[in-house]
Amino acid sequence: MAIGFRPTDDDERIIQSFKREGENTSDVIRRGLRSLERLAWEEQARADMAKLALEDLSDEPDEWEYDESGDIRVVGSDVVVPRREDHR
């Protein structure tokens, strides 16, 4: 699929100012698209963090516990993670 793009003079100025050695216009536009995607992800992450800022997990019960041998058992399941050997 090809997408047509007719840059304005200002678009061309921006493209040229961000062009790295060996890059063509398509490379600059691709980097710009990735940057927009990253910015959108960061904005969503910040919004999610703001929603969770007052969350207090200390009030929640643990979903894991240590068994008598020191292994970690996930509560309500058969999942057991062996304890790490002490490597001193």
Image (cartoon, rainbow, N blue to C red):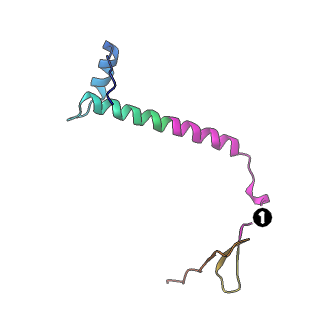
| Rendered location of residue 50, percent (x, y) | 67, 40
Locate residue 63: give its quadrant.
bottom right
- Of residues 17 and 69, the one drawn nearer to the viewer in this rendering: 69
**Quick one: which residue is furthest to the front in this view?**
1
Q: Which residues are magenta?
A: 40-64
Q: Which residue bears the numbered disc 1?
A: 61
Q: Is residue 20 above or below residue 79?
A: above
Above or below: residue 14 compared with residue 8: below
Task: Please state, as top left, top right, bottom left or bottom right, where the N terminus lies in the image.
Answer: top left
Q: Quadrant of residue 33?
A: top left
Magenta-drawn stretch contains 48: yes
For this view, does 42 lie left or right of residue 56? Answer: left
Front-lying residue, 27 or 10: 27
**Numbered disc total:** 1
Residue lying furthest left: 22
Q: Is residue 47 above or below residue 56?
A: above
Q: Is 9 located above or below residue 63 in the figure?
A: above
Q: Secondary structure at mark 1?
A: loop
Q: Amino acid at mark 1?
A: Pro
Question: Is 87 or 72 nearer to us in this picture?
Answer: 72
What secondary structure do most residues of the magenta stretch adopt?
A: helix
